Amino acid sequence: DPQTVRPTVKRQLVVAGATGLQAADRKVFGEGVSDPYAVIYWNDVQIATTAVEKETLDPEWETRVMLTIPDRGGLLRVEVFDHDVGSAHDFLGQVEQHVGPGSECSWDWDPDEMVLPSTSFQLRARKDAEGSEAESVPGKLTLRVENPIMRRLIVMQAVGLRAADKKTSDPYAVVYWNDREVGQTKVVEKTLDPVWESDFELAVDPQIGEGTLRIEVFDHDVGSKSDFLGQIEIPLGGD
């Protein structure tokens, strides 16, 4: 029903990889390759970037990012580039889709569940100034959308940290869930007993029901690399 007002929902977008990309570089013996990575935009705001996969036309990223989808839906755009050192990166193509419960969404999914199995989309060139349909270019991008179980994590504090700056530290913590960075706490200056009270959301795959939480603590330094102060690693869920 187009008149139905649906609440804002959160879904996990997985940029799984790509196949058959255009070769932007040449190896020593003439074989065509690229060093591809993808940049993810939600409503024209950049929200994530995948890792660079070296010398391949079929990268596997498995990059996860949360989408907050309002009732009216939103515009997802994923641009693929060839990474170059010392020069502009080569544009290899993009996928642009309206995502949400409305009629503008062209995905074959249940508008109430809003999950998408692994699906390949043809890469296209950028649209022209008039916004007309862009021509296809070599390569397909594989995406899926999952409905994870959301869990709230509060990183409260630490006590008795090592002094990295004479008698004190400027500590902060970095949170990882299944080896993917979720976020960072604020920096608390000049203390060995920081209180952060920082909130994070962990997306748990409902089919697996478990994962590994890792929290790394650092001393923040201006103009130099942060000093590692320690970490904890905890398996969560499962039996």
Image: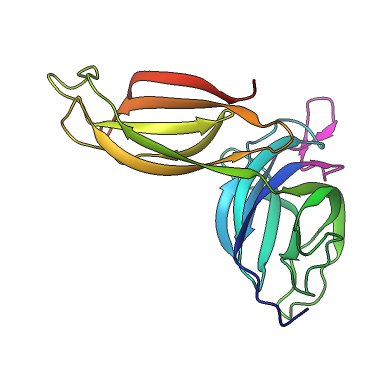
Query: In the depicted view, which residue is nearer to us: 143 or 25?
Result: 143
- Residue 219 % position (x, y): 28, 27
Residue range corresponding to the magenta coloring: 17-36
Reply above or below: 200 against 137: above
Q: Is 234 positioned to the left or the right of 149 in the image?
A: left
Locate residue 205, reporting x and y percent. Answer: 68, 37
The answer to whether residue 33 is magenta is yes
Answer with left or right where residue 8 lies relative to residue 81: left
Q: What colour scheme has been applied to the protein in the rendered image? A: rainbow
Q: Residue at the front extreme?
A: 239
Indicate whether residue 14 is drawn in magenta: no
Tell me what residue is drawn at x 62 percent, y 60 percent.
9
Horizontal relation, residue 54 to residue 33: left or right: left
Residue drawn 65% across and 67% down?
A: 74
Q: Main secondary structure of the magenta part?
A: loop
Question: Please, is residue 200 above or below residue 192 in the view?
Answer: below
Q: Residue 109, position in %: x, y?
A: 83, 59
Residue appearing at x 86%, y 65% in the figure: 135
In this rendering, does residue 222 appear at all? no
